[in-house]
Image (cartoon, grey):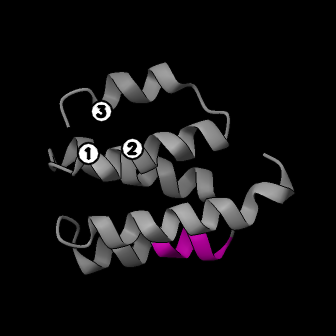
């Protein structure tokens, strides 16, 4: 991950939080925010995906799109996330 991407990753993450607020609990948002505040965007993304999948939470297409923008920006394996989030 490139240090130049950090402001972009933070911006995407914060926008994603706003979209997830109706679906996620405040404690889930706070837990993820701790990772973002520490610059641990990968852990934040993994946690978001785990909460969605394990909690069988329905998220908007816009939130799903932001997740995939984060996946691309962090150069993560897109197929892995598509498989996990296929029905969400």
Q: Given the current orientation, which residue lies at the most extreme right position?
A: 3
Q: Residues within 10 Å of mark 1 (few under 14, many from 20)?
A: few
Write the residue at 49% across / 51% down. Answer: 45
Mark 2: secondary structure: helix
- Of labels 2 and 3, the one closer to you: 2
Q: Quadrant of the C terminus?
A: top left
What residue is shown with label 1? 61
> Are circles 1 and 2 on residues that touch, CB within 8 Å?
yes
Dot 2 or dot 3, earlier in sequence: 2
Dot 3 or dot 1, earlier in sequence: 1
- Which residue is more in the foreground, 49 or 5? 5
Write the residue at 39% across / 44% down. Answer: 65
Q: Where's residue 5, x and y in %?
A: 76, 55
Q: Where's residue 84, x and y in %?
A: 33, 29
Using residue 38 as the reference point, say whether residue 2 is left or right of it: right
Q: Residues within 10 Å of mark 2 (few under 14, many from 20)?
A: few
> Are circles 3 and 1 on residues that touch, CB within 8 Å?
no
Mark 1: secondary structure: helix
Name the disc covering residue 65, or none.
2
Q: Is residue 52 above or below residue 22?
A: above
What residue is shown with label 3? 85
Q: Quadrant of the N terminus?
A: top right
Does residue 15 appear in this view? yes
Q: Where's residue 81, x and y in %?
A: 42, 30
Q: Residues within 10 Å of mark 3 (few under 14, many from 20)?
A: some
Magenta highlight on residue 83: no
| Dominant SS type (magenta) | helix
Q: CA distance from mark 2 to mark 3?
A: 11 Å
- Of labels 3 and 1, the one closer to you: 1
* Residue stretch rendered in magenta on the structure: 33-38
Q: CA distance from mark 1 to mark 2?
A: 6 Å
> Are circles 2 and 3 on residues that touch, CB within 8 Å?
no
């Amino acid at each position: 991950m490139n240090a130049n991407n950090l402001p972009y990753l933070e911006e995407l993450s914060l926008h994603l939080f706003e979209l997830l607020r109706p679906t996620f609990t405040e404690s889930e948002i706070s837990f993820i925010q701790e990772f973002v505040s520490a610059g641990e965007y990968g852990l934040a993304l993994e946690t978001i995906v785990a909460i969605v999948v394990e909690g069988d939470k329905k998220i908007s297409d816009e939130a799903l799109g932001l997740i995939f923008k984060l996946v691309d920006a962090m150069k993560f394996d897109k197929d892995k996330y598509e498989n996990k989030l296929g029905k969400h």
